[in-house]
Amino acid sequence: MSLPQPLIHRLPDDALLEIFGAYYGILQPHFTLSDALRLSSACRLWRATARRLQCLWSHLELDIMNPEVDHRAAYWLGLTKQSNLFIKIGASFRGARNFPLPGYRMEETDEALEARLVRLAQILQPCTPRWELFSIQLEEQDIDLFLRHCSTNDHVPNLKVFKAHFMRNEGHPLQPVRLWNIPYDRPPNSKADISVCCDYSIPVFTATFGWAITSVSVAIGYVRATADDLLGVLRLCPNMVEFEIFSHSEYIDAPAATSPGPIQLLHLRRISISGLINVDYILASLCLPSLEFFEAHHMDWTTPIIGTIVETLRNCSPSLSHVSATGYHHGPFSDDIPFDTEPVTLSSLRHCCIRPPALDTGDRLIQQLILPHVEILDIANVRLDLAHPIISSSDRLHSLTLDDVCGPVPQLILPTLTSLNIGTSMHLLHTLRTPQLTNLTLRGEDYTADQTSAQPLRYFLDRVTPPLQVLQLQRVDMSDEQFLWCMGRLTELESLELTYTNITDAAFSTLAEPLPAGDGMPLHWSLPRLTKIEVSSNYHLGPPGLIKFIASRNGSAPATVGRPARLEGSAFFHPSANRRDREIIESYGIRATPQ
C-alpha cells in the first residue's frame, strides 16, 4: 500500500494559491524576487502554482552586470501578465566592498554594458503604464542611456514611487548641480500619491506629474545649488505633503531678484532641511499654513537666519507639533539687527529640540518661544536662566534632555516629568524637583572631571527619592560606596546600565549578598525588582564581580532569603573577558560580548 501524500500535496490548487497570496501580503512592502524564488524551488507543485500568481513575480531586481539580465526580465515580465510592477535596477560590484559603486564599469567594456542596458530598457518600456515603483542606481551616463530608451509618450498612471541615485565621485566637491528631467507623466487631475527621491540631482518634471507628487526627497551632496533650483521643485508640487533636502553642509546661492512671490504649499505637513547652511533662502520663500513637522539641521545660526526661522514658526504656530533645530556652523551675531521681540506661542507643539552649535548662539531663538503644552524637550548649549521659562511653563512635560547647560540655576519643579537625560551638567540635580521621575540618564565626557561627579546624584536621591525604574550612567565618576548607597535607595529600579564608570568588582560582590536585618527591616536584597542589566567598558569591573552578582539572581543554588527577580541583559568588558568567563556569564542568561 502506498504511503499517503504529504498534506501540502493534498491541498487544492486554490488553497495553495491563497496561502501564497497571504505570504505575499504579510511580507509587503518588503517582498522581493528572492522570496518568490524560494517558494518556487520547494517542489514542482509549488513551482507550478507560484507561476500562476502574478504578484509574486512583479518585484524585479535587475543587476545590469548579469549578462542574462534582459532575458531574465523578459521571462519574469511574462509571468506578471497585467499586475503592477516594482522595478529596481542597479549594478553589483565585485571589488573590495560588495555593493554598487561607480567602479562597476571597470569590470567589462563600455560597449557590452551599454548594449545590455539598451536591451533591458526596450524590454521594460512597453510596461511603463504598470510601474508602481521604479528605482535606478547607476552612474549618470547609464541612467541617461536607460531612460532615453525607456521613455514613453504614454502616461504612468500607477506610478507611486520614483527613485534615482546618480553615483558620483565624492573626491570632487562642489560639482555643479544637475537639473534632471523625469521623462514620465501622469494624466491631468490624477490622484496625488507619488513619492520622488533623487540623489545628486534636482528633479524637474511636468506640471501634471508635479500635481500628483506628495513627497520629495532630494540629496544634493557636494554640489553647489541655488535657492531657485530647489524652489522650482516646490512650485511644481502644490499637493506636496513632505519635503526633505540633504546636503553636505553647503551654502546655496540666493534667489534671483525676479523670483515669483511666496510659494503656497497648503498641504505640506513635514519639512526637513539638513546641511543647507543658509536655510533662510528656502524658508523665507514658503507659505506653510498646515505645517506640523519642522526640522533644520547643520545650518548657520546668524541673526538673519534665526529671525527667518522664528517667523516661519510664528506663521505655522496653529498646526506645529514638532520642531527641531540643530547645527554646527555659526556666524556673527549683531544685536543692532532688527529682531521681532514679540514671543511666539506654539500651543500645539509637543516635541521641541533646540541644539545650537555653541553657547549663546541659540539664546535668541529660545527666548522667543513659549511652549505651554510641550511634552518632549531637548535643549543644549544654553544658560538655564534663559531656558527656564520654556522648561517650567509646560503643564505636560514628561521628557527632558539637557546637554551642556550652564549659568545661574533657579529651582525647577517639574511635577509631570517622568524621563530626565542630562549630559555633563550634573549640577542641575541640585535644583530639580521631579516627584514622578521613572527614567534617569546621566552622561559625562570624562569621568575624572568635576562635572561628571556622582555627588549631585546622591544629593538628588537623598532629598526626595523618585520612583526610578530605569537608571543609565555613562562616564560618571562614582565610588563603590556612592554606588551602593544609591542602589540601596532605588527599590523600584528595574533596569540598570553602566558604561565607562569606575565601579569595581567589590560593589557587585556586595550586591550579590542580601542586606542584613536592621531598622525594622528583615533580611532583604538590594534592587529587588531589577530585571535588566547592561554593563560595558567599566575598567574596574571584571567578570568575577558580575558573575557573583548574576549567580545570586539567576543561579540554582538555594538562597538564604527569597530570591529577587531574574536578570537578563549583556556584558562587555575592557579588557576583554576570557572565553571561560564569557561561557559562565552566558550560562546564566546574560549575553557576554567579546572585545
Image: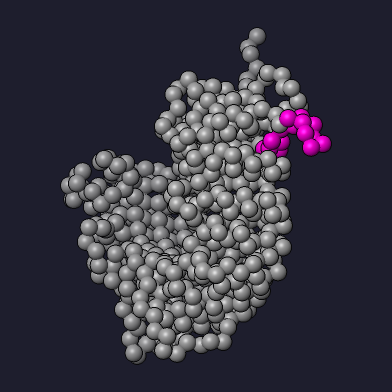
Q: Is residue 13 visible?
A: no
Q: Is residue 506 magenta?
A: no
Q: Using the image as rendered, state which of residue 539 and residue 565 is in the foreground.
A: 539
| Residue plotted at (54% across, 56% down) | 426
> Where residue 348 sits in the image (x, y, percent)?
65, 73
| Residue plotted at (79% across, 37% down) | 519
> Where residue 537 sits in the image (x, y, percent)?
46, 38
Image quadrant holding the N terminus, namely: top right
**Name of the residue lying farthest toward the top:** 1
**Name of the residue lying farthest toward the right:** 520
Residue 269 placement, left or right of 333: right
Image quadrant holding the C terminus, namely: top left
Predominant secondary structure, magenta span: loop
The quarter of the displayed image where residue 229 is located? bottom left
Q: Which residues are magenta?
A: 516-530
> Where residue 169 sits in the image (x, y, percent)?
24, 57
Q: Is residue 260 above or below residue 129?
A: below
Residue 532 placement, left or right of 71: right
Q: Is residue 553 above or below residue 471?
A: above
Q: Is residue 411 visible?
A: yes
Q: Is residue 453 above or below residue 175?
A: above
| Residue plotted at (18% across, 50% down) | 111
Q: Using the image as rendered, state which of residue 270 and residue 420 is in the foreground.
A: 420
> Where residue 500 sits in the image (x, y, percent)?
47, 42
The quarter of the displayed image where residue 141 is located? bottom left
Q: Using the image as rendered, state which of residue 172 and residue 178 is in the foreground.
A: 172
| Residue plotted at (37% across, 47% down) | 62
Residue 352 placement, left or right of 418: left
